[in-house]
Image (cartoon, rainbow, N blue to C red):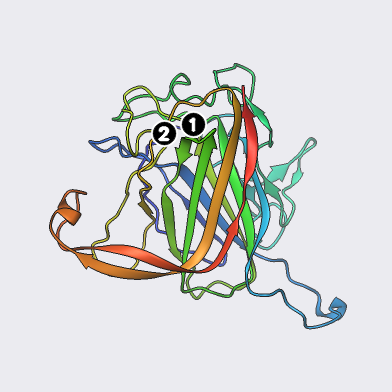
């Protein structure tokens, strides 16, 4: 699948919602991680077996976080959605999702509530290795990712994080930032991604799955400096009005991505629900970032947050 690097999808959670963000090229090296968001309700509980009316304290609860194998073939399902993760999506019975109707050998109807992701691993090759994973190494400088314009982005793996949301908070924005470092050097920085609020149609609790197709560092045609390569710049930001734009936006961290090297790489993940506050700015604060004046910047007051941190080994 040719992955261009501009977010395109509307960022609103539904009871069952999937958000896939593709990529296009800008005149500048304006790139962002290709990511996917899936939200599913928790299974219904048989009231006959409930011992008490106790419920979880409103919060975000970590479920899984790992670096997993990317698609065995870089392509999309017929409807354009990502091959992984694939869920039954609680549509009434096994096999109800046409994009993952069966599972296993021999094939059986895709089980209700099932989830398919890539295989997790600790050790990952930096260089392209035929027959290993999807064949692409994790060093973007040598794995086939190319150029500032019409770039072909070749991920070696997928960042996978998931959590349970018991907050019943459908008005505050979902934020996430993922940073990957080696001995203090940044090799990946998503910037602060704002998915927007869940919206009133959500029935809590829900499980949220966030995945990012990923390689590390920078590729030929990208310069060394702030927001290069896999260090994301602003996207859809600053805002044109004092409200959520109804689409994902990214606030740059201003970090410089270095080339990955053999050794341990540390993932640091911040996920939160937070209340946005908008500030009107004018002039160069807008136009220097390609946005008409006046425009709006955002700061957030955190309500709920979870860290999800782990290591891998690049070789």
Closer mark to the observer between disc 2 and disc 1: 2
Left or right, 267 with reference to 34: right
**Does 128 appear above or below 281?**
above
Mark 1, secondary structure of its residue: loop
Q: Position of residue 206 (x, y in %)?
A: 63, 66
Q: Position of residue 211 (x, y in %)?
A: 55, 46
Residues at marks 2 and 1 touching, judged by CB atoms closer than 8 Å: yes
Residue 224, visible in the rendered structure: yes
Point 53% across, 53% down: residue: 37
Left or right, 192 with reference to 78: left
Q: Based on the displayed image, in which of its 4 quarters is residue 118 positioned?
A: top right
Looking at the image, is mark 2 or mark 1 earlier in the sequence? 1
- Image quarter of the C terminus: top right
Label 1, on which residue? 216
**Does 296 appear above or below 129?**
below
Point 36% across, 50% down: residue: 8
Residue placed most toward the observer, 291 or 70 = 291
Residue 79, visible in the rendered structure: no
- Total numbered labels placed on residues in the image: 2
- Please tell me how crowded label 1 is: few (under 14), some (14-19), or many (20+) other residues with Cα within 10 Å: many
**Does 257 appear above or below 239?**
above
- Please tell me how crowded label 2 is: few (under 14), some (14-19), or many (20+) other residues with Cα within 10 Å: many
Residue placed most toward the observer, 33 or 234 = 234
Mark 2, secondary structure of its residue: loop
Point 45% across, 30% down: residue: 217
Label 2, on which residue? 257
């Amino acid at each position: 699948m040719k992955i261009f690097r501009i977010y395109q999808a509307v960022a609103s959670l539904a009871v069952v919602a999937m958000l896939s963000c593709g990529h296009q090229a800008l005149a500048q090296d304006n790139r962002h991680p290709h990511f996917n968001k899936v939200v599913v309700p928790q299974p219904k509980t048989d009231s006959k077996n409930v011992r008490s009316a106790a419920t979880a304290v409103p919060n975000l609860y970590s479920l899984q976080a790992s670096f997993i194998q990317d698609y065995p073939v870089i392509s999309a399902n017929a409807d354009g959605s990502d091959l992984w993760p694939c869920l039954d999506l609680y549509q009434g019975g096994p096999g109800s999702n046409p994009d993952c109707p069966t599972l296993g050998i021999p094939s059986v109807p895709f089980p209700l509530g099932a989830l398919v992701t890539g295989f997790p691993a600790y050790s990952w090759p930096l260089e392209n290795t035929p027959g290993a994973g999807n064949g692409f190494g994790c060093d973007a400088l040598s794995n086939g990712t190319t150029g500032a314009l019409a770039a072909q982005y070749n991920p070696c793996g997928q960042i996978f994080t998931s959590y349970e949301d018991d907050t019943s908070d459908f008005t505050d924005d979902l934020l996430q930032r993922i940073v990957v470092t080696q001995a203090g050097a940044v090799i990946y920085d998503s910037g602060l991604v704002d998915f927007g609020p869940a919206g009133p149609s959500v029935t809590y609790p829900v499980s949220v799955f966030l995945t990012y197709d990923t390689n590390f560092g920078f590729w030929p045609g990208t310069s060394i400096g702030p927001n290069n390569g896999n260090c994301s710049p602003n996207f859809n930001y600053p805002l044109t009005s004092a409200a959520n734009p109804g689409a994902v936006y990214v606030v740059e961290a201003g970090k410089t991505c270095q080339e990955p090297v053999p050794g341990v790489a540390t993932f640091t993940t911040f996920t939160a629900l937070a209340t946005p506050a908008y500030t009107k700015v004018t002039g160069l604060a807008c136009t220097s970032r390609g946005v008409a004046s006046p425009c709006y910047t955002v700061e957030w007051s955190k309500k709920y947050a979870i860290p999800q941190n782990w290591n891998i080994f690049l070789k």
